[in-house]
Amino acid sequence: MVTEERRHEALAALGILDTAPEDRFDRITRLAQRLFEVPMVSVTLLDGERQWRKSHRGLTTEAPRESAFCDLTARQDAPLVIDDAAADDRFRDNPFVVGDPHLRFYAGEPLRAAGGEPVGTLCVLDTVPHSLSAEQLQLLRDLADWVQAELDRDAQSDGVAVVQTALLPRRKPTARGFEIAAASEAGAAVAGDFYDWYDDGDGFCVTVGDVVGRGMSAAIVAASVRAALRSTTPYAGIERAMEAVSANLEDDLGRLGVLATAFHARVAPSGTVEYVDAGHGLAFVVAAAGGVRRLEPGLPLGTSSTDRVAATERLAPGDSLLCLSDGAFDALGGERGLLRAEAIVRGSATPAGAVSRIVSAARAAAPLSEALAIVVRRGD
């Protein structure tokens, strides 16, 4: 049995308590809120007498730990699902049920430190009862695995830099009528971000990927994703290529303890962008006339999904497709930094200037985990 002292030491060693919000976690809670259709979602860590929330929707950053459902989830080190707390003799008098936030439904998955100590949860909550299907329970486990991978992200990065360098494309697409540029910079720890681009018939493809996990395992998965998308897309198309990659990786990702997201798009000469976003969530259209449109993400690679389907956008003359890594997005200010990103892209004479300014802005932020930016601009 894990003692409270050991749990506290393991949590402190993560170095995440009382840190600023990060979009790599906020992306997960936003997605969970949409998929489960609940008003409240939280990545909760249990510190002393408090619940501290690294990312949350519809809740406060801190709350008392005593009597918390998340505390019970961590203590039993197993999933906890309460369909209707008011109808359950164990919980009907719980202070979080009879008082704010008047919970009726709770489903939580435990999160663990590097040594396996349960230190928190990913949970979804509501003020009305819910009943989850087997598929939804698996989805919650998948999302918790994504959070777990992010918590483990900085571990065992040796050797990844060599593979990352080899993954960078050596020449730009022909891309008549378009300008394209990318820039990246690693932080103190090597991240699993990669990008790719190449000609595909009369158009071209752009890929941004993020593999979170442990060292060389993450690098191997990144190389596999890149190679599979490159080889499959010309014959199968965007959607079928992404589904094939996801299905082939499902077992490997679980065994290796990593998680992968990707944005994969084909840009046609007409400006039509066909894309599939597998959990990346950081691709945008920056309109020449003003405004930013976020391209909707689906579930990460390796998870069974009918939600991961191809969608289309259109780049009008002067519009830009902007793809960021989560490190670059965080450094720009997260959601609040979108206006800054828009100003940089629209205010730069070339995509090369835009990506350089984005990475420079990220470099000025501390600490820098990594930064990657791609801009595709349709000519006037």
Image (spheres, rainbow, N blue to C red):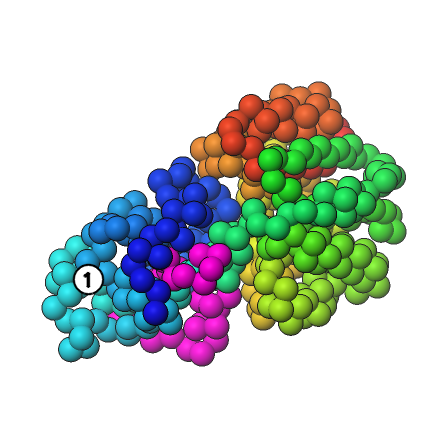
Tell me where residue 180 appears, x and y as whole percent: 76, 34
Q: Is residue 313 above or below residue 31?
A: above
Residue drawn at x 17%, y 55% as measured from the top left = 100
Q: Nearer the viewer, residue 273 or 20?
A: 20
Q: Is residue 174 above or below residue 34?
A: above
Tell me where residue 311 appears, x and y as whole percent: 64, 56
Residue drawn at x 56%, y 46% as measured from the top left = 154
Identified by mark 1, the residue type is: Ser
**Does the magenta portion include 117?**
yes
Q: Secondary structure at mark 1?
A: loop
Q: Residue 34 sits in which quadrant?
A: bottom left
Q: Is residue 330 above or below residue 76?
A: above
- Figure quadrant of the C terminus: top right
Residue drawn at x 51%, y 36% as measured from the top left = 330
Tell me if residue 70 can be seen.
no
The range drawn in magenta is 113-142
Residue drawn at x 78%, y 60% as measured from the top left = 228
Q: Residues within 10 Å of mark 1 (few under 14, many from 20)?
A: few
Tell me where residue 125 appears, x and y as whole percent: 31, 62
Q: How many marks?
A: 1
Tell me where residue 231 appears, x and y as whole percent: 83, 60
- Figure quadrant of the N terminus: bottom left
**Does the magenta portion include 209?**
no
Q: Residue 349 sits in which quadrant?
A: top right
Tell me if residue 218 can be seen.
yes
Report which residue position mark 1 lands on.
Answer: 67
Q: Nearer the viewer, residue 81 or 232?
A: 81
